[in-house]
Amino acid sequence: MPALAVLPTVSDFIYGVGIAAVAVAAITGVLEAGRKGMDLVGVAVVALATALGGGTLRDLLLDRPVFWIANQAYLLTALAAALATFFLVRAVKLPPRIFLVPDALGLALFTVAGTQIALDWNTSWLVASLMGVITGAFGGVLRDVFCNEIPLVFLPGELYVSAAWAGALALVGLQALGLEQVAAGWIAMAVIVALRLAGMRYKMRLPTFSARE
C-alpha cells in the first residue's frame, strides 16, 4: 500500500491518540446531528467533518500529507464509530447537551496529537501549540456550523480554545523540561479535560469585550 509510505512516521502513542480522537469526535458529531433530527447521510457528514476537519486543516497548513487520505484507518475508524453510535442511540432519549463530555475528551486527544505532530514536523513551539489548538477545535466548529449552532469556541465564557492552548503549551513545556512524550501527553490531556469540565461545571469565564459608551 504505497499511500501509507508518504505519511510521516508518528509514535505508536500519537497514532493511538489520533485513532481515539477521530472515534470520539465522530461520536460527538452523531450526538449533535441526531439532536437535530438528521438522517443517516446528514449524521455521517457531520460526524466525518467533526472527526477529520481539524487534522485536515493542520496538515494543509503544514504542507503535510492529509492524515486520513494517507492512512485510511482514520477514516474507517470515524465511519465505524459514527455508524455504531447512530444505531445504538436511535431509540434512546439523550440529554440535550450530552455531547459536551465526549467533546472535552476529543478536544484533549486531538490537541495533544496535533501539537506533537507539529513538533515532529520541526515547527516552533508557538506554531506547534497553535496547530494543536486548530486540530482540537476546528472539527467542533464545523460540527456546530453544520448543525446550525453557534460554535462553542465563540460562546462567551466557554473555556474551549483556552483549555486546548493551555494543554498544548503544557505538552511543549513538559517535553522541553525533559519529560518523556507519553507522560507529557497524558498530563497535557488531563489539563485540557480538567479545564474544560471545570469551565462548564463552575461557569468559569474569560474576560469579554465591553466597549465604553
Image (cartoon, helix red, strand yellow):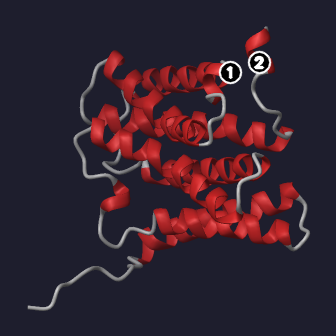
Q: Which residue is drawn at 50% across and 73% down?
A: 198
Q: Which of 4 and 137 is in front in this view?
A: 4
The amino acid type of the residue labelled 1 equals Ala
Q: Residue at x 33, y 33 (%)?
A: 33
Q: Taking the image as drawn, is residue 98 in sight?
A: yes
Mark 2 vs 1, N-terminal side: 2
The amino acid type of the residue labelled 2 equals Leu
Residue 146 is situated, as x and y percent measured from the top left of the image, at: 29, 35
Q: Which of 169 and 125 is in front in this view?
A: 125
Q: Taking the image as drawn, is residue 197 in sight?
A: no
Q: Which residue is drawn at 77% across and 58% down?
A: 185
| Picture quadrant where residue 180 is located | bottom right
Q: Residue 100 carries which label?
A: none
Residue 42 vertical position relative to residue 157 in the rendered view, above or below: above
In the rendered image, which residue does mark 1 sit on? 70
Residue at the extreme bottom of the image, as rendered:
213
User: What crowding class fits label 2: few (fewer than 14 Cα within 10 Å), some (14-19), or many (20 or more)?
Assistant: some
Residue at the extreme top of the image, as rendered:
1
Contact? badges 2 and 1 (CB < 8 Å): yes
In the rendered image, which residue does mark 2 sit on? 4
Helix, strand or loop for disc 2: helix
